[in-house]
Image: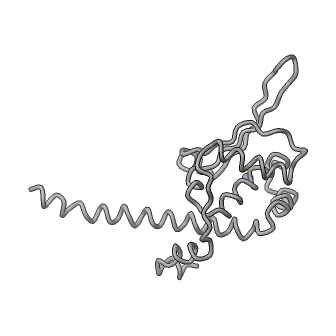
């Protein structure tokens, strides 16, 4: 893997392994997508509240997804509402990576810890879960490397830009 990164080929390798994009463009479509997964695999879990893309998640919380339970009293009864947030970068990620993070956050509705029961539920929903989680990390490494390369290039451009202005 290090060799692939070093040779700047990780991006091309990932793109050829995961050519499939997805059509989930907004929060409404994301809700429908996660809801469909839930219907198929976790019908008995409590209903989903909000599901949304969050552009600040990765930056502020260093997380790719979060799940929270908001409890409030409604009509004399305690009503729990589940909220799932998924980092916005998954909007443009290959389809299997979005499925991986959706499965991960859904599984947390039932299993709080990253333990054996949790991963069993993940692989029940997505048999290739472990490989996808690993490859998502590679994808993030590659995104990060691309961003670094871009800012390095921007830095390199500055002196000549200044030269032009003088
Ligand atoms: Zn987790």
User: Between 155 and 82, which is closer to the camera in this rendering?
Assistant: 82
Please tell me in which quadrant of the rendered image residue 82 appears. top right
Q: Residue at x 55, y 79 (%)?
A: 2
Q: Residue at x 83, y 27 (%)?
A: 79
User: Between 37 and 145, which is closer to the camera in this rendering?
Assistant: 37
In the shown orientation, is residue 9 left or right of residue 120? left
In the shown orientation, is residue 14 left or right of residue 83? left
Q: Which residue is most to the right?
A: 44
Q: Which residue is most to the top?
A: 76
Disc count in the image? 0
Q: Position of residue 139 (x, y in %)?
A: 58, 66
Please tell me in which quadrant of the rendered image residue 56 appears. top right
Quarter of the figure that contains the N terminus: bottom right
Q: Position of residue 33 (x, y in %)?
A: 71, 50
Q: Position of residue 135 (x, y in %)?
A: 65, 69
Q: Position of residue 98 (x, y in %)?
A: 66, 58
Indicate the colouring scheme: one colour
- From this view, report whether residue 77 is shown above or below residue 41: above
Quarter of the figure that contains the C terminus: bottom left
User: Between 13 and 160, which is closer to the camera in this rendering?
Assistant: 13
Q: Which residue is most to the left?
A: 166
Q: Residue at x 88, y 21 (%)?
A: 77
């Amino acid at each position: 893997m290090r060799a692939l990164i070093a040779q700047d080929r990780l991006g091309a390798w990932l793109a050829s392994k995961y050519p499939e994009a997805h059509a989930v463009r907004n929060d409404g479509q994301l809700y429908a997508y996660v809801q469909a997964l839930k219907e198929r695999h976790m019908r008995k879990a409590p209903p989903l509240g909000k599901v949304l893309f969050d552009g600040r998640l990765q930056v502020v919380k260093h997380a790719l997804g979060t799940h929270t339970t908001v409890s409030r009293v409604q009509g004399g009864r305690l009503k729990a509402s589940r909220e799932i947030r998924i980092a916005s970068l998954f909007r443009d990620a290959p389809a299997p990576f979005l499925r991986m993070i959706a499965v991960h956050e859904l599984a947390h509705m039932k299993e709080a810890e990253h333990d054996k029961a949790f991963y069993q539920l993940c692989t029940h929903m997505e048999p290739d879960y472990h490989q996808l989680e690993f490859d998502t990390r590679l994808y993030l490494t590659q995104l990060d490397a691309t961003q670094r390369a871009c800012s390095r290039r921007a830095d390199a451009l500055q002196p000549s830009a200044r030269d032009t202005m003088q």
